[in-house]
Image (cartoon, rainbow, N blue to C red):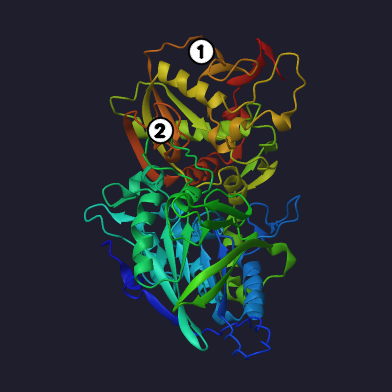
Amino acid sequence: MPLNRRKFLKKSAVAGAGVAIAGAAAAPAAQAAEPRKPAKPAKRYSLTVLGTTDLHGHVFNWDYFKDAEYTDAQGNAQGLARVSTLVNRIREEKGRENTLLLDAGDTIQGTPLTYYYAKVDPITAKGGPVHPMAQAMNAIGYDAVALGNHEFNYGIETLRKFEEQCDFPLLGANALDARTLKPAFPPYFMKTFRVKGAPPVKVAVLGLTNPGIAIWDKAYVQGKLTFPGLEEQAAKWVPKLRSMGADVVVVSAHSGSSGTSSYGDQLPYVENSAALVAQQVPGIDAILVGHAHVEIPELKVVNAKTGKTVVLSEPLAYAERLSLFDIELVFARGRWSVESVAASVVNSNTVADDPKITKLLSDEHAKVVAYVNQVVGTATETLTTVEARYKDAPIIDLITKVQEDVVREALAGTSYASLPVIAQASPFSRTSEIPAGEVTIRDLSSLYVYDNTLVAKLMTGAQLRAYLEYSAAYFVQTAADAVVDVAKLTNAGGRPDYNYDYVSGLSYDIDIAQPAGSRIKNLTYDGAPLDDVRQFVLAVNNYRANGGGAFPHVASAQELWAESTEIRTRIAEWVTAKGVLDPKDFASVDWKLTRNGTPVF
């Protein structure tokens, strides 16, 4: 499909009807000698920008993996149906004509609902359905949405079809056509707000996405799209928007604010650079932040060149929060200028679902509920991830066993068929459970929540040793005589659970009394010390294979095979073929935590 600027790039200005909110300045006191005319009240305008991010397919407050209403210990509620109610309330308070509704990306991946309409009943099929996220966001009335990295998980064709179904533009100023280096998506969106008795207020929204797409979805975008850094493209586009008459510039950025990256030195661009954009690029008033899945009601960053404060806000993911930017403008000396910006977040648990959204998507929701509740096998015992972060859990061994089997079959008859196949997997969820008895698709989907696919990489023993040492840095260093608190044992340096890997087929200890980099002990293969020069085939997910998590050697290792079928689907196929899910068919104790050689558990 040709990569072009699409319909919204041609429509860069959208007129909106605005109403002035005028404030009267105090008239000067009368002079005893000669009265003066009272000063004209300054023209003022109040604009409210609303923002969501990282919706990840959450339309309803429903947990498809548990087949029940979503609940958590914090009392959060999820879904666009809740956001719709919040948006309606705020529009009523502020005047719809004085509001702008944005999103900062990661929209069409993340729940069985979005998977179903990408793979089971795909929107790309001839006469196919309209994506539920497009339906919901159109109904709510989004003005513009930035591209997230997960928008590319199902390939460009699916993304383009979703774009076609949306009544709003998908923005990506730094998503460029690899051949022409011109924007492949609209870089910006502009909207004009009418003000009684004064010139209109012109608001520009610049959309920026994550450079990590080039790594994480290389199979789909390599040679087609390129993703330069956010700071570089913001510095290019913000002056253009100002020269086009923008009185307010808002950035919707699918990029966190921490200034960190998960992909090491593989790219010259920072993954989480929203605060750097605010600091380095003059002319920005506010930034809606996404990608990091953290709640930031308001963050103020001073621009290094102008000294002006830029206000950032990141609402919690899955539609659990809605960010509000209250922007006050004043008209003086023939132009509008931003007088102040304040940001806050509103909690979705304070309202009920919008019945309009519930009714709109009830059929799609019912189809997906029926799909995920299909029975594919029977489990002989309950399997859970509760302790999988710090103990070798059979439920994770299921993932590695499936990956090993798929790769062995794929390499049969090739020159690599005689090499030992090992596999990696991460404890994605802390709450996943496959209960004894009937096993459904939703049980298996909760185990593997990402739409990752499988890759086979050629690795040496020495490289695998380095890989394991890097993985073991996930644990907090704990002295041999210290009390072990499992709640504080992991996530050292803020590393998420999905960036800790098991590796099957090898046997090893992780000595957490030692500093990171010196923890892997008693590393063996087939009962003998691991040979540094021996070659192995590592069955690995595409996120890790492309450099996600910055694990050493794997991204640069020779790729022997890859496929587009999701690992989650392969697990369901394996269980369906077996009929019975019995740990004796896949479980093994490959690793354990120790302290100075003594097991922790």
Q: Is residue 307 left or right of residue 515?
A: left
Residue 216 quadrant: top left
Q: Earlier in the sequence, mark 1 or mark 2?
A: 2
Front-most of 553 and 23?
23
Front-most of 247 and 448?
247
Looking at the picture, does residue 557 appear above or below residue 5?
A: above
Secondary element under disc 2, as helix, strand or loop, is helix
Identify which amino acid the numbered label 2 is placed on.
Answer: Val
Q: What numbered label is drawn on residue 407?
A: 2
Looking at the picture, does residue 95 appear above or below residue 437?
A: below
- Nearer the observer: mark 1 or 2; the answer is 1
Expressed as whole percent of the image width and height from the top left, the position of residue 239 reads 36, 62
Front-most of 258 and 115?
258
User: Which part of the image, by quadrant, shows the C terminus?
Assistant: top right
Expressed as whole percent of the image width and height from the top left, the position of residue 185 reads 34, 63
Q: Mark 1 sits on what residue?
A: 524
Residue 519 quadrant: top right
Residue 473 quadrant: top right
Q: CA distance from mark 1 to mark 2?
A: 22 Å
Query: What residue is at 40 percent from the left and 63 percent from the top?
Result: 171
Identify which amino acid the numbered label 1 is placed on.
Answer: Thr
Expressed as whole percent of the image width and height from the top left, the position of residue 522 reads 55, 11
Tell me if mark 2 has few (under 14), some (14-19) or many (20+) residues whose alpha carbon lies within 10 angstroms of its own.
Answer: many
Q: What numbered label is drawn on residue 211?
A: none
